[in-house]
Amino acid sequence: MQNGHLESFNGKFRDECLNQHRFLSLADARRLIEAWRDDDHTTRPHSALGQVAPAVFAQRLAASADLSSQAA
């Protein structure tokens, strides 16, 4: 095992995207992979982020930073 995080991602990407689709062209592959990436980065909950989606986590983090800067 070289990098546990990367190997975990590669396995998830293979199982959830690459093994699920038959790509008809490079453009088709790009479109489907981008759709998977967008879903993974915006709507799917991640255990490392407390079971919230990365977009929600980023919004909460930004709001927290704004509150901290206003308090100072």
Image (cartoon, rainbow, N blue to C red):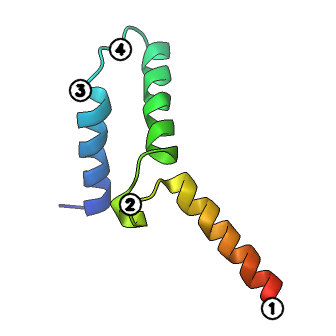
Q: Residue at x 81, y 91 (%)?
A: 72
Q: Residue at x 50, y 15 (%)?
A: 27
Q: Residue at x 59, y 61 (%)?
A: 58
- Alpha carbons under labels 2 and 3: distance apart: 25 Å
Q: Earlier in the sequence, mark 1 or mark 2?
A: 2
- Kind of residue at badge 1: Ala
Q: Earlier in the sequence, mark 1 or mark 3?
A: 3
**Residue labelled with disc 4:** 23
**Residue labelled with disc 2:** 51
62 w.r.t. 20: above or below: below
Q: Which part of the image, by quadrant, shows the N terminus? A: bottom left
In the rendered image, is residue 26 in sight? yes
Q: Earlier in the sequence, mark 2 or mark 3?
A: 3
**Residue labelled with disc 1:** 72
Give the crowd class for mark 4: few <14, some 14-19, many >=20 residues within 10 Å: some
- Alpha carbons under labels 4 and 2: distance apart: 31 Å
- Alpha carbons under labels 1 and 4: distance apart: 53 Å
